[in-house]
Image (cartoon, rainbow, N blue to C red):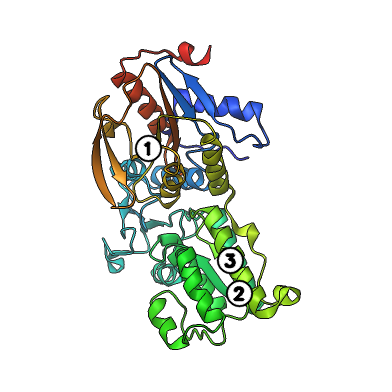
Amino acid sequence: MKQFQIPEFYRSPIISKVKTMRKLDDPRKKDFSPTILDFGKVSFIISRHFGFCFGVENAIERAYKAINENPGKRIFLLSQMIHNPDVNEDLEANGIRFLQDTSGKQNIDFETLTKDDIVLIPAFGSTLAIEKILTLKGIDIQKYNTTCPFVEKVWNRSEKLGESNHTIIIHGKYNHEETRATFSRSSIHGPSLILKDINEARILARYINGKKDCQTFYKDFEGRFSQNFDPKVHLDRIGVVNQTTMLASETQEITDYLRSVMIDKFGELNIKNHMADTRDTLCYATNDNQSATIGLMELEADVGIVVGGYNSSNTTHLVELMESKYPVYFIKGESEIISNKEIRHFDIHSKKLKSTHNFLPQKEKISIAITSGASCPDSIMDRVIHRILEVQEIQITMNDIFD
């Protein structure tokens, strides 16, 4: 696989060594068991796969390439490069400015841009409407387009679904940058509808099987369907794609459920005429990170820690997985570990920061399950591990870790 040139401060002594060791031992990535680093008083159970994925490293490499190649020019990012505060703060420190926030709200008016400006498209991609605005201004949006190739794969699959007269069902968060970008493309190729979760799939099923009046469809799915969408016509032939950072298991659950609904309506023998096979749109990195988190949870631990940006979809899903087994603390970095008794963390349910006291049990040996999202630099994971060892008054050297 391609090796990306990203700033050295994103890498780390501990995590880089762990990943190198695992890659040598398991080059085909078939082993999802975690790595254990034992420091006596504290041991870390580290997920097999975590941190920067292909698409994120590609985006970061191109962003710094744009900085280095364009001294003196104004450089903008359409919105956050990835959902990690450290990465975005460093880009801003290097002179890059964000045109929009993550919800699409304008920070800087497009009218102020000129053809001499550099605009980077983030890893999530962009809507066709925004691309048109930038292109009409004479801005080259392809030179530093960092759209993840796995996102583009979903776009291509959506186009093929439209060409084969399928309605495109997108499993995603309807205000997420990636889902907005996918929807803008899918809706020009065929009728499109966004589903957030399995509960919305169950609501949709009632329209598919005729148990709910189609007049209420437009209220139930307001703002999430393409123009001229007709539930009486457009729900007889469907295919499911996803926002690549969603839980793969949930996308599969939605797909399997809707398939069963279509079988009930049209019969097993006719299912191929009504439901497309779209398993190939799941992102390998999201899949690997989630599968590795499940592998991590096969071992017992006192607490779980997930590291990443609080607005990161893929990281939030890792928290959802882990909290089914451990008390889990979702932190953006080492600064959230106040002491060996207090941690500040993000609650994904209340969407608020919380402080928890006595988060580490008072016992002779503590075991911590730890992973991070696809937009989290290894260096932050490294610093989190060091910070926990520091508050536990454990001094280490690299030789202590890799003897």
3 or 1: tag closer to the N-terminus: 3
Answer with left or right where residue 221 lies relative to residue 393. Answer: right
Residue type for callout 1: Pro
Give the labeled residue for mark 1. Answer: 327
Say which of marks 3 and 2 sits in front.
3
Residue 37: x percent and y percent? 48, 21
In front of the other: 294 or 385: 294
10 Å neighbourhood of mark 1: few (<14), some, or many (≥20)? some
Answer with left or right where residue 241 lies relative to residue 102. Answer: right
Q: Residue at x 55, y 31 (%)?
A: 34
Q: Quadrant of residue 190?
A: bottom right
2 or 1: tag closer to the N-terminus: 2
Residue 336: x percent and y percent? 27, 34
Q: Quadrant of residue 396?
A: top left
Give the labeled residue for mark 2. Answer: 238
Height in image: 354 above or below 13? below
Q: Secondary structure at mark 1?
A: loop
Q: Can residue 270 be seen by looking at this rendering?
A: yes
Height in image: 223 above or below 331? below
Q: Secondary structure at mark 3?
A: helix
In front of the other: 308 or 132: 308
Q: Residue at x 63, y 72 (%)?
A: 161
Tell me the CA gap for discs 3 and 2.
Answer: 13 Å
Say which of marks 2 and 1 sits in front.
1
Q: Residue at x 32, y 44 (%)?
A: 85
Give the labeled residue for mark 3. Answer: 257
Residue 121: x percent and y percent? 43, 57
Residue type for callout 3: Tyr
Answer with left or right where residue 346 lies relative to residue 32. Answer: left
10 Å neighbourhood of mark 2: few (<14), some, or many (≥20)? many
